[in-house]
């Protein structure tokens, strides 16, 4: 007898409907599994066999052929276990074959028959809704995650016996409710702790308001990391479809604990030994990299000059396009990569260039250190800030505004952007096209002339010109102005200058 049930595979971050087919026929006992599965998929034969026997079901001593269709799609992971077990129960007439109509199953099986949660459950639920599935059966521990998708019935299943009872009509399915969202966790990091760095604090506020990329350059211990780790607290929490998008990414990557929608902006800080695949994504089965895991949040690269040059250059296209496409022999996978890049670096190998006798590097070593950062990469950074050790008087007399105060201004700037482009898909000023920025209702004539003059003098290139306009628009939003003025452009231009006197 032949039985079929729906399940889902993951292609990058997207769910693909898969049909688990099981055919049981007379013949020499054998269990063959086909459908282009990886090792974890092929091993599901043994998990299914043990789970059925340990749950009190019969394992048919016949010829069993299982297929995961479409056969041309490469499949990975143990999430097909429960679907194969359900189809095998139906094909061996231990549950009604018709009970699988309109049902999808997505879970791993233990040898004892318990259903275990799998990464990508939220994506599978979205795929089930899009496919017109009436009921999705998942492991109890992940049912709340799947129930975040509205318009879909999600059944929480504890083990294989409960699964069979639900399919046989002997038990009511326990419908899951969305997991209650937890409040955003307060990191306890306050911008007011930063003293003597008003220029850097201002740059951090601009970066938060417009999602602009930021490079901080200065000696060790000056506060670069301290500033970067306070950036997520300045940005408003994720809302609506952004939260669902980030939650799906974390679910596919195995970072989601099954709680409510992720509302806190992700903050990723990979070590400088990270590979290009780890940074932008890759693998034989493409998985998201750090730039995708930081989507709609912050990617912090500390000690930027210590990262391998080829890893940093892999970031150039994602920073420009807001997405990254990983091409492998089996196909291409596209991941979102719209994050705020914050980088910190020292000006030279010893870190004390420009501080007189404290620096022990010759000019050749300094030049070699500077060349580790390619010009095209730095050109994609909107804000270039030099930090220096403050004097004792500056430490005693100056302090930054609190995180709550700056976050309030950032929220007001976001509201200003929403009023300006109410029906647009633009989520931040860093994404705004040039045409939107140079509209006469958005940019004053004098401000445009100032940008053009800077371009004519070679202070900025074509890409830099647009990025200056974006930063200037954010500065205007922070002061809740309708038009971008000359003072906004001049401040934005001042943050394109590098420490060494060069320009980008």
Image (spheres, helix red, strand yellow):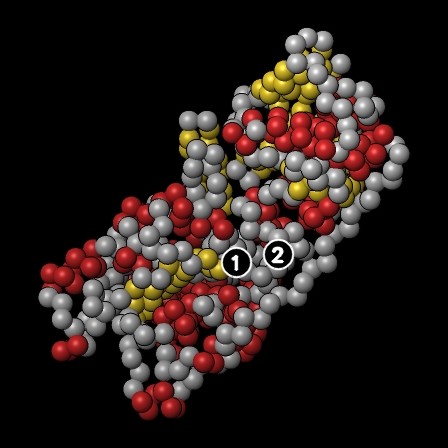
Q: Residue at x 33, y 55 (%)?
A: 272
Name the residue rendered at 76%, 24% in the picture.
58
Q: In the shown orientation, is residue 149 left or right of residue 269?
A: right
Q: Quadrant of the N terminus?
A: top right
Quadrant in the picture for the C terminus = bottom left
Which residue bears the numbered disc 1?
Answer: 266
Q: Are marks 1 and 2 in contact (CB under 8 Å)?
A: yes
Q: Residue placed at 59% from the left, 35% from the top?
A: 78
For residue 262, which numbered disc appears in the image?
Answer: 2
Q: State how far apart marks 1 and 2 are (Cα).
A: 9 Å
Report whether 231 appears left or right of 80.
left
In the displayed structure, 254 sits above or below 36; it is: below
Q: Which class describes the residues within 10 Å of circle 2: few (<14), some (14-19), or many (20+)?
A: many
Q: Is residue 131 visible?
A: no
Marker count (numbered)? 2
User: Could you tell me residue 482's position as x and y percent?
Assistant: 53, 67
Any part of residue 102 in sight: yes
> Where residue 25 appears, x then y in whole percent?
71, 11
Please tell me in which quadrant of the rendered image residue 349 appears.
Answer: bottom left
> Helix, strand or loop at disc 2?
loop
């Amino acid at each position: 007898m032949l039985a079929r049930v729906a399940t889902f595979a993951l292609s990058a971050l997207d769910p693909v409907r898969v049909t688990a087919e099981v055919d049981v026929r007379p013949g020499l006992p054998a269990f063959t599994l086909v459908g282009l599965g990886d090792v974890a998929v092929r091993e599901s034969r043994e998990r299914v066999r043990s789970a059925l026997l340990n749950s009190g079901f019969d394992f048919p001593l016949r010829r069993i052929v299982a297929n995961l269709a479409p056969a041309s799609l490469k499949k990975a992971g143990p999430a097909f276990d429960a679907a194969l077990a359900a189809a095998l129960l139906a094909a061996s007439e231990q549950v009604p074959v018709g009970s699988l109509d309109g049902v999808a199953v997505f879970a791993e099986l233990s040898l004892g028959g318990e259903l275990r949660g799998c990464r990508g459950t939220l994506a599978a639920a979205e795929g089930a809704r899009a496919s017109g599935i009436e009921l999705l059966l998942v492991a109890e521990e992940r049912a709340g995650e799947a129930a975040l998708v509205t318009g879909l019935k999600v059944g929480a299943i504890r083990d294989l016996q409960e699964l069979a009872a639900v399919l046989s009509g002997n038990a009511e399915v326990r419908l899951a409710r969305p997991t209650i969202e937890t409040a955003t966790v307060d990191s306890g990091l306050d911008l007011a702790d930063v003293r003597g760095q008003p220029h850097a604090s201002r740059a951090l506020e601009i970066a938060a308001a417009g999602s602009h990329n930021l490079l901080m350059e200065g000696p060790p211990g000056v506060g670069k990391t301290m500033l970067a780790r306070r950036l997520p607290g300045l940005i408003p929490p994720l809302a609506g479809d952004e939260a669902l998008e980030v939650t799906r990414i974390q679910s596919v990557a195995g970072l989601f604990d099954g709680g409510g929608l992720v509302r806190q902006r992700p903050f990723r800080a990979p070590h400088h030994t990270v590979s290009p695949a780890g940074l932008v994504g890759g693998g034989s089965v493409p998985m998201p990299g750090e730039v995708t895991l930081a989507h709609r949040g912050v990617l912090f690269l500390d000690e930027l000059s210590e990262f391998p040059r080829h890893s940093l250059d892999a970031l150039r296209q994602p920073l420009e396009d807001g997405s990254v496409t990983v091409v492998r022999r089996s196909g291409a996978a596209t991941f979102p990569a719209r994050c705020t890049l914050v980088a910190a670096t020292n000006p030279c190998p010893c870190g004390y260039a420009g501080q007189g006798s404290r620096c022990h590097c010759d000019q050749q070593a300094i030049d070699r250190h500077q060349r580790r950062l390619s010009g095209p990469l730095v050109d994609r950074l909107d804000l270039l800030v030099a930090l220096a050790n403050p004097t004792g008087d500056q430490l005693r007399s100056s302090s930054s505004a609190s995180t709550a105060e700056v976050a309030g201004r950032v929220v007001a700037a976001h509201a200003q952007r929403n009023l300006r482009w109410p029906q647009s898909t633009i989520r931040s000023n860093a994404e705004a096209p040039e045409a939107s920025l140079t509209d006469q209702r958005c940019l004053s004539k004098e401000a445009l002339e100032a940008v053009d003059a800077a371009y004519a003098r070679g202070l900025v290139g074509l890409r830099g010109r647009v990025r200056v306009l974006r930063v200037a628009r954010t500065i205007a939003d922070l002061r809740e102005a309708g038009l971008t003025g000359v003072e906004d452009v001049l401040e934005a231009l001042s943050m394109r200058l590098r420490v060494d006197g060069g320009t980008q």
